[in-house]
Amino acid sequence: MKVAIASDHGGINIRKEIISLLEEMKIEYVDLGCECDGAVDYPDYAIPVAEMVANGEVDRGILICGTGIGMSIAANKVQGIRCALVHDMFSAKVTREHNNSNILAMGERVIGPGLARSIVETWLTTSFEGGRHETRVNKVSSYEAKVIY
Ligand code: RB5
């Protein structure tokens, strides 16, 4: 398992916390920043992470901004990305089991570092259930492919 992680200026503290967690879990990661004093634009971080996941350079992505909303909107524009905005433990588990989400977005202005760590741990260790959920995920992918081509 290899993970790409990034945040804008609104998500730096939780990004650092999650990097510590990835090191504790011995999960390989690529940190795409930001290394910023001032404000940056979330699409400049969400899209590179999403492209790395979509082209198979990494298995999963984790994105943090103030709310997680901008990051999730931007990441979901990249073909093949299923980015889930998650701020509770139930959704962290079920978005893996049912949606096979490949990017997790969180908001540092919404949750604290302890809950963010628990969400990431659950999201990284929960498997996709397949079956009827695969049928549904495939319907989304088919629509996405039809729009692009
Ligand atoms: C930055 O102020 C803020 O808009 C950003 O971190 C994020 O919340 C956007 O969705």
Image (cartoon, rainbow, N blue to C red):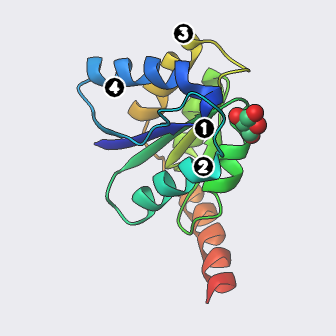
Q: Residue 114, which numbered label?
A: 3
Secondary structure at badge 2 equals strand
126 horizontally vs 77: left or right: left
Question: Along the line of sight, which residue is nearer the eye, 39 or 33?
Answer: 39
What's the residue at 45%, 63% (across, down)?
Answer: 54
Residue occupied by mark 1 = 105
Q: Position of residue 71 (x, y in %)?
A: 65, 45
Secondary structure at badge 3 equals helix
| 3 and 1 marks in contact (CB < 8 Å) | no
- Real-space CA distance between mark 2 and mark 1, rounded to the nearest whole angstrom: 7 Å
| 3 and 2 marks in contact (CB < 8 Å) | no
- Near mark 4 (Cα within 10 A), the count class, few <14, some 14-19 or many ≥20, is some
- Near mark 3 (Cα within 10 A), the count class, few <14, some 14-19 or many ≥20, is few
Q: Earlier in the sequence, mark 3 or mark 1?
A: 1
Q: Residue 83, which numbered label?
A: 2
| 2 and 1 marks in contact (CB < 8 Å) | yes
- Is residue 42 in sight in this rendering? yes
Query: Looking at numbered disc 1 in the image, what kind of residue is underneath it?
Result: Ala
119 horizontally vs 31: left or right: right
Residue occupied by mark 4 = 22
- Real-space CA distance between mark 3 and mark 2, rounded to the nearest whole angstrom: 21 Å
- Real-space CA distance between mark 2 and mark 4, rounded to the nearest whole angstrom: 19 Å
57 horizontally vs 54: left or right: left
What's the residue at 64%, 71% (across, down)?
Answer: 139
Is 66 drawn above or below residue 81 in the view shown? above
Please state, as top left, top right, bottom left or bottom right, where the C terminus lies in the image: bottom right
- Real-space CA distance between mark 4 and mark 1, rounded to the nearest whole angstrom: 16 Å
- Is residue 99 in sight in this rendering? no
